[in-house]
Amino acid sequence: MGSRQRLYGTGIFSLGMAALGVVVSNPYEQQLLTIIGIHTLLALGLNMLMGYAGQISLGHAAFFGLGAYGTGILTTHFQWSPWASLPAVLVFAALSGYLIGRPILRLSGYYLAMGTLGLGIIVHVVFREWDTFTGGASGLVGIPPLTVGGLMVGLGRSGFFAVWGTVVLFFVLCGRVVDSRIGRALRALGDSPGAAAASGIHTAHLKAVIFSFSAVMAALAGYLYAHLLGFISPGSFDFLMSIRMVTMVVIGGMASIWGSLLGASVITLLPEWLHVFSDYEMMVYGLILMVVMIFLPEGLTRGVLDAVRRTRARTASS
């Protein structure tokens, strides 16, 4: 998809979501759509790392949690305003993502997967055990809501527009990155790291930069999540959350910006459809990953588009 087409598509999507935000009045449906938006932001950031740069991460929920706990601790324990904590959280995520990414992204394949898995486990243990600031297993309560011009931003219509406005902004930003020189370097890195290095790309620096960028998006999602819900607990940022994020990317389609939206929507809505399998959530995600990788290796987005093209071709030839 060209940059002009992507821009037009984003504009149409923005109008559609604005209309949806006005039409939907049921509080539960508003909350569900808002959570889909947060998950879309998570999947989009991870897709930039996995889909375009070809770097796996099984611990990305750590940065989601850093954003949530970072702003939660600053606003509840140190009485910072939510808006003052935002740049602090994003800068910390960017720096930690880059500094962690430089050594850990020297690994590849299974070793990289295990390294990022270890990162996620360590951070989750800190959330659970550092109860002086995080509240431990009981969670952190009393996180103040965002306010804009005296208007409180909650899980209703205001939260819907805040989250989806952020998602649209990053759709545009990620589209610009993909279409830029950096995007071409990322695709070269994902296709063949050796060839990318031979062509003059500083692969170690580029890996760390895209890891940092993805970490910032995850932290921003965590920031929004914390202030919209007002309560966070370690269970929201565990290994299973990292697996959900990877599943969103794979189902929607690797290296697909719009696929991140589709994957996030499916994985967020799936528990609503399959209540009976709630005790077997990990098995269900594993089964979905297997089926998609076998029958739709390029994800649902590309699979659906290819099916539409084949149908049109048959119709035209008949």
Image (tube, rainbow, N blue to C red):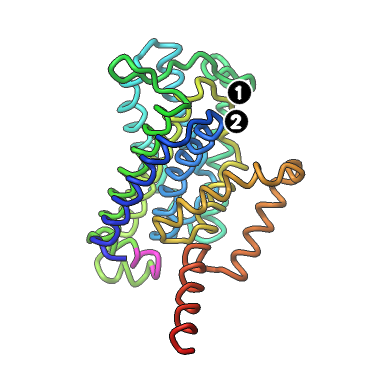
What amino acid is labelled 2 in the image? Val
Q: Nearer the viewer, residue 272 or 182?
A: 272
> On the rendered structure, is 93 left or right of 173?
right
In this view, 9 is above or below 67: below
Q: Which residue is mark 1?
A: 129
Residue 37 in percent (x, y) is at 45, 40
Residue 227 in percent (x, y) is at 44, 23
Q: CA distance from mark 1 to mark 2?
A: 6 Å
Q: Which residue is mark 2?
A: 125
Magenta-drawn stretch contains 188? yes
Q: How many marks do you count on the picture?
A: 2
Residue at 65%, 58% (x, y): give it.
288
Q: Secondary structure at mark 1?
A: helix
Magenta-drawn stretch contains 298? no
Q: Which residues are magenta?
A: 187-192
Q: Nearer the viewer, residue 208 or 134?
A: 134
Is the Cβ of the residue at disc 1 closer than 8 Å to that at disc 2? Answer: yes
